[in-house]
Image (cartoon, rainbow, N blue to C red):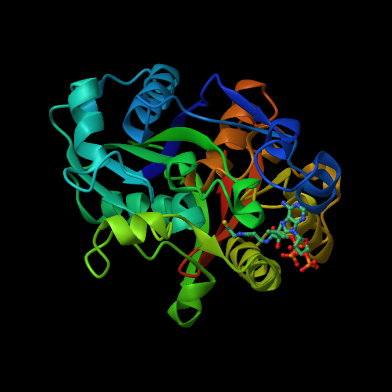
């Protein structure tokens, strides 16, 4: 038995927010945002659209590609820090929308590392339990809902999107996921956090006025940790998979900052041409960002059977990891 990714799908909202529009909201400018981050624009979900709606659209595309009926999905896992509501899980609401009535469902969050964590979680569960033959794994965020639109240090960074993949058990004894590493360091919890809205600081008028329900980030400290962690975990994932950068067709890093992506590529020995970019059009979409590129490249035929791809991510927690896929 092997575990293969047989479908990918993604969705981004229609509404575009450009850097020049942000210039009217906070003291910033297109030149600063472009040179410091690589971001030119991002997509913003409508008020009545959130991670379940976006995820449902992405999932339908992934199921179509996989030629798999929702009834044949045994497990739905959704990685997000912005679920539609605290209870029930996004995964249960996706199950309802798709009528995937035979699926067990849960959400988890590993922030921007959600898809890397999710692939290992899904694969491990499929290996452990014969019940899970077809798994729908989603990563999606409506970061615009938890962005402090008065904080120029963060509001220029984020965008909304969702992505999905379908994993299935095949008779071919080969996995798509050939190596995986997952790490975390909770001692740096306060470099990237949302303090309010949980059980320690429930929603009150005061903490809404203080924007404690919004993302706060010490950007330059996160930056330094991110590069080192992504490089180290990527090297480990390649070592476990017994592959060199030369044998890898694409390096798809989490899309947080072009300078981080370039530094990671350089330090791993990848030409920048081998790094797909969606950050310029979508900003940082957290758990969705890697799936957006994966889906685009699969649909364009840039990733096909036998191609090896290295994925790596870093995010709040702090969490990070990397994995090697063989398509
Ligand atoms: C957020 C980030 C783009 C900021 O870039 P930076 O080069 O580190 O910039 P700094 O935070 O050091 O700020 C430099 C200056 O620019 C200013 N600045 C910050 N945001 C600005 C903006 N949008 N427009 C103009 N100036 C801005 C700061 O106030 C500071 O001014 P000062 O020198 O007068 O104090 C960058 O740190 C980053 O991408 N960090 C990592 C994000 C990440 O990986 N997250 C993890 C996963 S989500």
Is residue 265 positioned above or below 163 on the image?
below
Q: Nearer the viewer, residue 105 or 285?
A: 285
Left or right relative to 263: residue 289 = left
Residue 58 location in percent, x, y? 43, 26
In the rendered image of this protein, does residue 8 appear above or below residue 147?
above
Q: Position of residue 139 (x, y in %)?
A: 43, 42
Residue found 55% across the figure and 42% down from its top: 285
Closer-to-camera residue (237/37): 37
Name the image quarter holding residue 145: top left
Examine the rendered structure and indicate whether residue 74 appears above or below residue 284: above
Residue furthest to the bottom: 187
Residue 6 position within the rendered picture, expressed as x and y whole percent measured from the top left: 44, 30
Give the camera-side residue of 15 and 132. 15
* Residue pictured at 39% horizontal, 27% vertical: 47
Horizontal side, residue 155 vs residue 214: left or right: right
Q: Residue at x 16, y 43 (%)?
A: 88
| Residue at the image position 65 percent from the left and 62 percent from the top | 238
Residue 158 lies in quadrant:
top right
Relative image position of residue 102 (x, y in whole percent): 13, 31
Among the 4 quarters of the image, the one containing residue 233: bottom right
Q: In the picture provided, is 161 more to the left or to the right than 274?
A: left
Instruction: Specify whether residue 282 is in view.
Output: yes
- Is residue 75 something that shows in the picture? no
Could you tell me which quadrant the C terminus lies in? top right
Against 17, residue 114 (above or below) is below
Q: Quadrant of the N terminus?
A: top left
């Amino acid at each position: 038995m092997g575990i293969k990714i047989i479908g990918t799908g993604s969705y981004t909202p229609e509404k575009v927010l450009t850097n020049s529009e942000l210039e009217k909201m906070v003291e910033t400018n297109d030149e600063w945002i472009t040179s410091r981050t690589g971001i030119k624009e991002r997509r913003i979900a409508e008020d009545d659209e959130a991670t379940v709606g976006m995820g449902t659209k992405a999932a339908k595309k992934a199921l179509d590609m996989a030629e798999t009926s929702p009834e044949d999905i045994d497990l739905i896992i959704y990685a997000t820090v912005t679920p539609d509501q605290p209870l029930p899980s996004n995964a249960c609401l996706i199950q309802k929308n798709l009528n995937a009535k035979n699926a067990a469902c849960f959400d988890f969050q590993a922030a921007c590392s959600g898809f890397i964590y999710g692939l290992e979680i899904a694969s491990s569960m499929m290996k452990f339990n014969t019940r899970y033959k077809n798994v729908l794994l989603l990563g999606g965020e409506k970061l615009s809902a938890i962005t402090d639109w008065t904080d120029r240090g963060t509001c220029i960074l984020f965008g909304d999107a969702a992505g999905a993949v379908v994993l299935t058990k095949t008779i071919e004894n080969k996995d798509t996921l050939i190596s995986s590493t997952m790490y975390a360091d909770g001692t740096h919890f306060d470099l990237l956090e949302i303090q309010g809205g949980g059980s320690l600081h429930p929603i009150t008028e005061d903490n809404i006025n203080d924007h404690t329900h919004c993302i706060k980030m010490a950007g330059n400290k996160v930056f330094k940790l991110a590069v080192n962690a992504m490089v180290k975990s990527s090297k480990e994932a390649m070592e476990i998979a017994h592959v060199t950068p030369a044998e890898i067709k694409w390096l798809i890093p989490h899309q947080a900052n072009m300078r981080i992506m370039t530094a990671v590529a350089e330090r791993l020995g990848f030409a920048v041409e081998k790094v797909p970019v969606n950050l310029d059009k979508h900003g940082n979409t957290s758990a969705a960002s890697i799936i957006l590129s994966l889906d685009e490249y699969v649909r364009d035929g840039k990733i096909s059977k036998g191609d090896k791809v290295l994925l790596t991510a870093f995010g709040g927690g702090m969490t990070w990891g990397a994995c090697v896929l063989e398509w």
